[in-house]
Structure formats: C-alpha cells, structure tokens
C-alpha cells in the first residue's frame, strides 16, 4: 500500500456493530453517525483497531444523537507504540480541515473510550460554533493517553451537565487554542 492509497467512506450511519482494521487508511468524505440498538448490549458500537488511520475531508463523526434515543459507542483503543490516528486528508493539513468527533447525549458512556489516539487538524474557526477536535454534548466518554495537536479551537470541548464525571486524563495538548474548554 502506498501513501496515497485509502478506502473512501461516503458518510451515512453505522447501525450495526462494526470493526475497522488498520490494513488501509479510511477516508471519511461526508458526515458519519454511529447510533442504533445492535447487539446484546443494545448499543451500536464502532470499534477501531490499533494502528488504524482515519482521514477526513470536511466531515466528522457523531456518536449517539441529541434528537433520537438510539445509543451509539466508539471504542478507539490504540497502543503506546501503535496509536489510532484521526487526521486531515489534505496534502498540506491545517487546523479546521475536518469537523471532529462529537459525542451526543445518547452516547453509551460506559462503552465509549478513546485511548492512545492522535487527533489533529480538526475543529472549526467559526465564531458562532463552539468546537473542539472532540465535542462532548451531555456525554462523558473516557479519553486517556491521547495527543491533541494543531486543532482549530479546543482539543476537547464540553457542554452540558451530562459531561460531569467524564474521565479525561493523561492527554497531551499541543498547538490548539485551548487544551480543554468546559461550557
């Protein structure tokens, strides 16, 4: 596989439990949702394997939803020597190339975790939208041992009392306007 190879995922909604591997980078070209009631736990879960590279155009992920009760979960557990990379698909990336990952209030907080991930070049420069590389809207996933770098605004943006109790520890923030911002 050469550096220009990837599989394009043209947005949509994951409604069945799925696992994305590290065999070839994935390019998300349109907004992507993870929500539904699949599996024994009644939560549609997207698992991303260590070493996977997820590239984005002007798009992002939404886990769960604020309008629908269907839960969603994201499990992205890299390893210290094999992180999961969430990045821009641009040849010369810059902050705000992609929108980021949004955890909504129907996120299954007990399952959702990001660890040993690199999240870079996300967010928005809009003055009317508060935005982070990771947005928490009344959600409290676990976010640990990850690097947030060169994002447009906050590495992590949290809004709502439902974020209380989120486990956010041992992360590194470099080149963002804010490390973490609570609203």
Image (cartoon, rainbow, N blue to C red):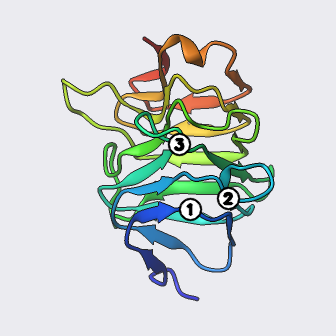
Pointer 2: residues within 10 angstroms few (<14), some, or many (20+)?
some
Distance from the alpha carbon under mark 2 to that under mark 3: 13 Å
Q: Which mark is residue 151?
A: none
Contact check, label 2 and label 1, Cβ < 8 Å: yes
Image quadrant holding the C terminus, namely: top left
Measured from the top left, where is residue 149 in percent x and y?
50, 39
157 above or below 165? below
Q: Residues within 10 Å of mark 1 (few under 14, many from 20)?
A: some
SS type, badge 1: loop
Instruction: Name the residue carrying label 3.
Output: 64
Q: Position of residue 106 (x, y in %)?
A: 56, 35
Q: Residue lying furthest bottom in this view?
A: 1
**Is 179 located above or below residue 97 in the figure?**
above
What residue sits 36% from the left and 30% below the top? 131
**At numbered mark 2, what does the secondary structure look like: helix, strand or loop?**
loop
Q: Earlier in the sequence, mark 2 or mark 1?
A: 1
Spatial separation of the CA atoms under disc 2 and disc 1: 7 Å
Query: In this figure, which residue is indicated by the disc labeled 2?
Result: 38
Which residue is pictured at 67% across the width and 21% down the height? Answer: 166
Q: Quadrant of the N terminus?
A: bottom right
Q: Earlier in the sequence, mark 3 or mark 1?
A: 1
Quarter of image, res 89: bottom left
In the displayed structure, 151 sits above or below 35; it is above
Q: Quadrant of residue 17?
A: bottom right
Marking on residue 15: 1
Q: Is residue 143 left or right of residue 150?
A: right
CA gap between label 3 and label 1 equals 11 Å
Q: Are marks 2 and 3 in contact (CB under 8 Å)?
A: no
Image coords of residue 173 (percent x, y)? 56, 29
């Amino acid at each position: 596989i050469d550096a220009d190879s990837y599989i394009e995922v043209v947005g949509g909604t994951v409604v069945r439990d799925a696992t994305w591997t590290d065999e070839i980078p994935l390019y998300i070209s349109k907004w992507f949702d993870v929500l539904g009631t699949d599996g024994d736990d009644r939560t549609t879960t997207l698992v991303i394997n260590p070493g996977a590279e997820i590239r984005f155009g002007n798009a992002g992920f939404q886990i769960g939803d604020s309008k629908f009760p269907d839960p969603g979960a994201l499990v992205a557990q890299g390893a210290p020597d094999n992180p999961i990379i969430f990045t821009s698909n641009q040849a010369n990336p810059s902050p705000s190339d992609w929108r980021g990952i949004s955890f909504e209030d129907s996120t299954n907080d007990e399952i959702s975790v990001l660890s040993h991930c690199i999240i870079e070049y996300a967010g928005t420069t809009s003055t009317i939208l508060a935005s982070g590389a990771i947005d928490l809207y009344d959600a409290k996933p676990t976010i640990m041992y990850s690097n947030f770098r060169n994002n447009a605004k906050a590495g992590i943006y949290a809004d709502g009392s439902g974020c209380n109790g989120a486990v956010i520890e041992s992360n590194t923030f470099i080149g963002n306007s804010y490390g973490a911002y609570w609203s």
